[in-house]
Image: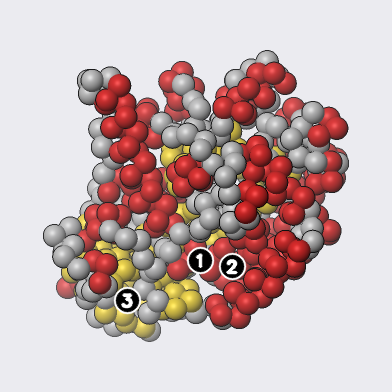
Amino acid sequence: MTTFLIRHATVLVTMDDRRREIPDGGLFLRDGFIEKVDKTTELPTEADEVLDLSGYVVLPGLVNTHHHFYQTLTRAVPAAQNVNLFNWLKTLYPIWARMTPEDIFVSTQTALAELALSGCTTASDHLYLFPNGSKLDDEIAAAQQVGLRLHASRGSMSLGESKGGLPPDSVVEDEDAILKDSLRLIERYHDPNPGAMVRIVLAPCSPFSVSQELMRQSASLARQYGVHLHTHLAETQDEEAFCQQMFGYRPVEYMQTVDWIGNDVWFAHSVHINQQEVTLFAHHGCGVAHCPSSNMRLASGIAPIWEYLEAGVKVGLGVDGSASNDSSHMLAEARQALLLARLRSGLLGASLSGTDAPPLLTARQTLELATRGGAAVLGRSDIGELSPGKCADWIAFNLNHLDYAGALHDPVAALVFCAPLHVDYSMVGGQLVVREGQLTTLDVEKLVDQHNRAARRLLAG
């Protein structure tokens, strides 16, 4: 039995059902779960470890709903800097085809270290190509050393250029092998219990890289074993044209034909969506991973976030791949989501004379997307808020940093409006992953050196 007590937080943001913000708040934790949340004066006075967080804002750990860890190896590649999604992919596929299991391992740790320092405590990753003997196991083993919760998506590509798909044949797999490995991973790693550190997701990459049959078979397998489904959808107008030419449907309509609509499904991006499709998502419980930085970087468009929220669609945030963002900073992504939603509102207001423009997204709504919203998208009821019975996943920011000077009027909103910083403390399941701004589980300097050597080798061919 281990206990942990947090005392005297300037503000403790619970994100519970009442959205309480507790001044001079604290937490009492036992064995990786929250036992009590209240004002400091109402909490026990002793624990195995006691931490005074006077001058800090404490909130639930942030939840990242879409990423490609391996892409940290190909950040800012010159030939991929100024192109849209399809040309970006065609530039990078041949480089990714040279990756090894060691590359998957070191890139996973690099991405997760960056996420941890930016406030993330649970991350979903989408690994969809497995060159040179690479496996999803390499990612899972790497993540276990970092200490963040992982939703490891067994991605796949089976529709190469020779069959009308976008990826080169060198990076696609046989569909029977994909399904066999998907089953192996579920049986070996998936943990459906509260507090799970690893869950498996089935995630064929996109409509332009897998067959209709693989989509259907993956959905059937996932539902047989109770795991979630994930894919890219409606990211670009190129994708919309591809789906209409290849299948005769818009992307969302195509998902209906392959049994990919339901409360166990979430889609990355979902930028080019009409109101009827928003309503469909809400009715069936589909989730959306909103990736504003990537959508801006690749000139893909602006997702209709306010329409999603107004309709009741589950929405979380995703940093997306570190070659289309080129960052894994969750708090920065929250800030970007706020700003981009406000830009869209302003643009719509100008075009509609202000009559039907969406209202401005608030800082607290944005933080909710990054916490409760992400938890809902991933199908987790044990994370995303600070309340009794939930996982002991919390983060803390010191308000005495220069970047927050003058922001004491509303320190919660300041986390989003001001420059995004690294966390000072982060706990996952009762274990401190970040203490006083330093990652406790890995040697970051050594990791960066290993990662850069891998990236140079990969780019050199």
Q: Position of residue 19 (x, y in %)?
A: 26, 50
x and y percentages locating residue 348 in the rendered image: 31, 26
Tag 3 secondary structure: strand
Q: Is residue 137 visible?
A: no
Identify residue for label 1: 114
Residue at point 70%, 68% (across, down):
456
Quarter holding the C terminus?
Answer: bottom right
Which comes sooner in the sequence, label 3 or label 2? 3
Q: Amino acid at mark 1?
A: Glu
Query: Which residue is the site of mark 2?
Result: 110
Q: Name the side, left or right, on which 309 lies relative to 21.
A: right
Q: Nearer the viewer, mark 1 or mark 3?
A: 1
Looking at the image, residue 6 lies above or below residue 340 = below
Find residue 141 and report its horizontal and vertical position in percent.
68, 67
Q: Position of residue 208 (x, y in %)?
A: 70, 32
Q: Which mark, residue 5?
A: 3
Q: Is residue 74 left or right of residue 178?
A: left
Residue 157 visible in image:
yes
Instruction: Inspect the image, locate mark 3, and give the three-letter code of the amino acid beneath it.
Output: Leu
Q: Can you tell which quarter of the image residue 112 is in?
A: bottom right
At label 2, the amino acid type is Thr
Instruction: Name the secondary structure under disc 1.
Output: helix
Q: Earlier in the sequence, mark 1 or mark 3?
A: 3
The residue carrying pointer 1 sits among few (fewer than 14), some (14 to 19) or many (20 or more) residues within 10 Å by Cα, namely some
* Front residue of this view, candidates 303 and 436: 303
Q: Are marks 2 and 1 in contact (CB under 8 Å)?
A: yes
Residue at point 79%, 28% (across, down): 164
Q: How is the image coloured?
A: secondary structure
Q: CA distance from mark 3 to mark 2?
A: 30 Å
Determine whether, in the image, residue 438 is placed left or right of residue 135: left
- Helix, strand or loop at mark 2: helix
The residue lying at 32 percent from left, 37 percent from top is: 343
